Image (cartoon, rainbow, N blue to C red):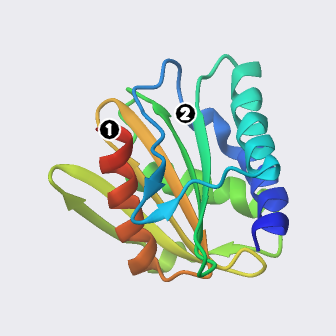
Amino acid sequence: MVGGGIAVIAAVVAAVIFFVMAHPKVRIPDEIGGIPRLETNEAQQFERFVEGMAGADGIEAEAAVYADQLGVTLFLIAGEDQSPMTAEMALRAFSTGVESANSQTTVRLTRLRAETRRGVPYACAPMEGPLGGGLCAWKDPDTVGFVFAPEQSVRRVLDLTHQSYDAVRS
């Protein structure tokens, strides 16, 4: 999933990177929820691609790919955003970009799950199609982040997004 997933995620990122604003107040961690950051050439190319696309638009974003030996993969994009956008608004707009980039993928916003933990709002929804899995967003007063994990339940991706937020903001 990592190889093909990176190519498809790159297309998704092209459609939605405008959400992540300048001067990120984020730190990309070496692992999230016990899943180590992937240090392959392919993963690093993806990260540079995302960051370069954002840079071309005057946006500083941080991106990372994580994978463990069990096949759990997650993609993280995070940066500063001081807009009044909510996590649900960010997820809805990101979903539009996902579906535009890959017409065979559907984000089931009718099954959107919103939650606030320690004052941070999160929104998640299942994805169906070649990019099946879960997609989540967080939005605090200073940052926005997106986590996509193929072949994972929304509950699992929500947990990984909580862990991602804590790691990114520490």
Image height of 118 relative to 159, above or below = above
Image height of 19 relative to 67, above or below = above
Q: Secondary structure at mark 2?
A: loop
**Is residue 21 found left or right of 16 in the rendered image?**
left
Report the residue at 30% width, 40% height from top. Answer: 140
The disc at residue 20 is 2
Between residues 21 and 109, which one lies in front from this camera angle?
21
Report the residue at 49% width, 65% height from top. Answer: 35
- Can you see residue 48? yes
The amino acid pointed to by label 2 is Val
Circle 2: is it few (<14), some (14-19), or many (20+) Cα within 10 Å?
many
The amino acid pointed to by label 1 is Arg
Q: How far from the left and from the top, in percent, is residue 79? A: 49, 33
Q: How many marks?
A: 2
Residue 56 falls in image quadrant: top right
Q: How far from the left and from the top, in percent, is residue 143? A: 39, 34
Image quarter where the C terminus lies is top left
Between residues 118 and 106, which one lies in front from this camera angle?
118
**Is residue 59 found left or right of 22 in the rendered image?**
right
Report the residue at 67% width, 79% height from top. Answer: 132
Q: How far from the left and from the top, in percent, is residue 93? A: 58, 51
Residue 6 falls in image quadrant: bottom right
**Is residue 106 found left or right of 122 in the rendered image?**
right
- Can you see residue 86? no
Between residues 116 and 161, which one lies in front from this camera angle?
161
Comes first in the chain, label 1 or label 2: 2
The disc at residue 169 is 1
The disc at residue 112 is none
Q: Secondary structure at mark 1?
A: helix
Report the residue at 84% width, 67% height from top. Answer: 4
Image quarter where the N terminus lies is bottom right
